[in-house]
Amino acid sequence: MDVALGLSEGGWRLQVQPALWLSLLLLLLCLEACGWLRDWRRGGAGGGSASGSRRLPGPFPWPLVGNALQLGDSPHLTFARMARRYGDLFQIRLGRRRVVVLNGEATIRRALVQRGAQFAGRPDFASFRLVSGGRSLAFGRYSERWRLHRRLAQSTLRAVCGGGGEGLLEQCVSSEACRLIEAFLRLGPAGRPFEPAAELAAAAANVMCSLCFGRRCADDDGEFRRLLGLSERFGRAVGAGSLLDVMPWLRAFPNPVRALSRDFERLNRDFYRFVGRQVARGRATYRPGVRRHMSDALMAAVGRCMPGEGGNAEAREAPERLGLEPEYVESSVNDLLGAAQDTTSAALSWILFHLVRLPGLQSRLGQELDRVVGRERLPRADDRSRLPSLEAFIYETLRYSSFVPLTIPHATTAPVELDGYRLPADTVVFVNQWSVNHDRRKWAEPGAFQPSRFLRRDGSLDRELAASVMLFSAGKRRCLGEQLSKTQLFLFTAILLHQCAFRANPAEPLSAGCTSGLTIRPRAFTLSVTLRDKRRGIVSPA
């Protein structure tokens, strides 16, 4: 038939297929333009409602792409610039999706805290349903079962890492910090520069492996290292503004977004299988009443919430609403491990970046540690209150970097009014945390790195100001692992500074740029590491 038509197989691919793709694209453009005109006539760029509420301001949206091309590599900076023109509450379009953007501490808290339940939802994004086997606490939709899941995870974290469990967390971090120093010295013998990012990710993940599974992963575990190396792709796919979710039609033909989609699916599948194998090992030797690690605590908690015989009375009466199946153990661990290693390793990258950028500050922090801790032991969590300069440095790093600039996208669970604007149910909401931490109305010279802003005149830490740094969201979706992450970050930073001196690579100027995703990190940099006390060597954990 092809010969009869005068087309070979190669001619078909070269002549007919491109024409078909072009025709399909033109059809999509026409359909989008019709939908765009209809939406524009109904509500304009800012929406509005038939009840007469004000229209949300916002930039002009283009057909097919909306405002996606305006966001650039750093959407949080774009949103901050838009807020100066349209106010702290405005609307954009990404593809056909309308998105409300919240900026500024007052607006964000009015939404997430004062109207917490109405802003606690998650969008029905395809990528969200792939995370943690579809039972993710971080990405799951707001429901009665989700609330039960959150209470379960919160109580488990408190039991393992709070109260009497703080010793276990400190032991895991102290041990891993010393292993990290050993890895640094192997990678950079005699002060040779090296890139620390991969080791930071492995150390942060291994703290969570020790807490969740009772054992760390081996340094030469190829699968573990490969999965950690792919975490940046995960962030690009689920971060606010991802074309993957707001323009799903891009999956229909070859393009970089479709390739990212397939990588994302594979990463989620592989990481969940990795976690499942670790949990299965623990489940095979699990004994009720014996808590060895977080997986054991989760197994016990989920067991009490299972529908049917053995579960609680509420679950037996309404299993479709309240029951939690055994797979929620794997899902909870998957969330905890993935989130904790990503945020902690990103924060540590910024910590080291600023230490090598500011050697004088590094020296003063080392002197404070020597004065308070001495040289005979490692810093402990209970030293924190006596190390105000170190804490101020950490909080300024969190504020300045704002390495989680946008929260995971929210969605309204019901019609809600905010600042005089009526938002319908299922409205996608982006929360710009960066705008809170760089608000000139609150912070003097927010673009300057000044740890002293967190110190009172008497030298003590201004804890009220420190607590106002927004990095872990707020309201009903506030990160469960906030205190866990802050404790880890303090211990890692204190031990690294107590034991090591860090120097920038003189042959490589530090870049002011960063890489964007769900978390933002400094661009790859190298540094050199030497022990502060070479005669004594690395102090062993107590």
Image: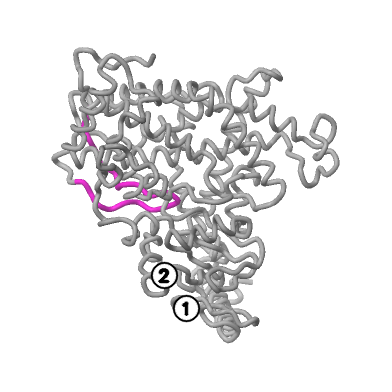
Magenta residues: mostly which secondary structure?
loop
Q: Which mark is residue 69?
A: 2
Range of magenta residues: 510-529
The residue sitting at 48% across, 21% down in the picture is 167
Could you say whether the residue bearing mark 2 is in a helix, strand or loop? helix
Q: Amino acid at mark 1?
A: Trp
Q: Earlier in the sequence, mark 1 or mark 2?
A: 1
Pick the quarter of the image with the N terminus: bottom right
Q: Which mark is residue 62?
A: 1
The residue sitting at 49% across, 30% down in the picture is 208
Q: Is residue 513 magenta?
A: yes
Residue 40 picture quarter: bottom right
Could you say whether the residue bearing mark 1 is in a helix, strand or loop? loop
The residue sitting at 62% across, 67% down in the picture is 416
Q: Which mark is residue 434?
A: none
Q: Can residue 26 be spotted in the picture?
A: no
